[in-house]
Structures are given as C-alpha cells and as structure tokens.
Image (cartoon, rainbow, N blue to C red):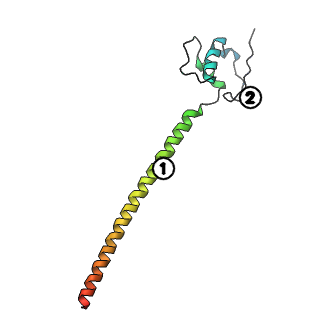
Amino acid sequence: MKGIFYAFGPKFKQNYTLANSSLLYNIDLFNLMCTILNINPCPASNGTVKHIEPFLKPNFDKLWFLLVIIALGIFVLVGVSWLIYSCRKNKSTSNIDRNNVHYSQIATEQQS
C-alpha cells in the first residue's frame, strides 16, 4: 500500500511529482511542517530534510540578502570612486587657477 501526498502553496514547486514515491516517508512530514512554518532550528526527529527538498522551491531569503549586500557594496564603491575623482579633479583645477593667477600677476608686473 502506498500513500498519496498532495501539496499546494507558496513554498512548493508547481506540477512536481517525485520520480520514486518511496522517497517520501511519513516521518519526513514533521521536517516539512517545520520548513513551511519557518521553525528554525527544527526540533530533533528521525526524519530528514533531504527527502523533502526536491519538491520545495528554493529559499530566496538568503539570495535576496546577498543581492542587497552586493548592491550596497557596488553603491559604496561607486560613491567612493566618484568622491576620489571629484577631489582629484578639484585639486588639479585649483592648481591651474593658482597658476593662471600667478602668470597673470607676472604678466602685469612685466607690463609695468
């Protein structure tokens, strides 16, 4: 006698069937409920998460966190690069202005 397991929800893959129905044991349903309800860590049991992972959608919480960290890192890198570039540009522009003032003062002194 074989059991039938149907599941529907945001954590389950759509239209997924296990290739070998003997891979899902009743003892694994406890771990499945802990996973669905985000109970971390799942209390000790004889079941395993390895049997229920094939029909669950991937966990994107960690992926979103990683993407946000990468985006913030890129934002900070671009900001610091722009700040360094603008400081160097202002420094070189101020040297040119000082040099122009210097040359204009020399030209004024020579004309006198």
- Residue at x 44% of width, y 50% of height: 77
Mark 2, secondary structure of its residue? loop
Residue denoted by label 1: 75
Left or right? Give the position of 45 relative to 90: right
Q: Which quadrant of the view contains residue 81?
A: bottom left
- Residue at x 53% of width, y 20% of height: 41
Mark 1, secondary structure of its residue? helix
Crowd band around label 1 with a 10 angstrom C-alpha radius: few (<14), some (14–19), many (20+): few
Q: Quadrant of the N terminus?
A: top right
**Distance of mark 1 from mark 2, alpha carbons?**
40 Å
**Relative to 15, residue 29 above or below:** above
Q: Earlier in the sequence, mark 1 or mark 2?
A: 2
Left or right? Give the position of 80 relative to 43: left
Name the residue nearer the viewer: 55 or 21.
55
User: Three-letter amino acid code at disc 1?
Assistant: Phe
Q: Which quadrant of the view contains residue 47?
A: top right
Image coordinates for residue 5, horizontal then vertical, percent: 73, 18
Crowd band around label 2 with a 10 angstrom C-alpha radius: few (<14), some (14–19), many (20+): few
User: Three-letter amino acid code at disc 2?
Assistant: Asn
Residue denoted by label 2: 15
Image coordinates for residue 101, horizontal then vertical, percent: 30, 78
Image coordinates for residue 50, horizontal then vertical, percent: 59, 20
Name, please, the residue furthest toward the bottom: 112
Q: Is residue 36 visible?
A: yes
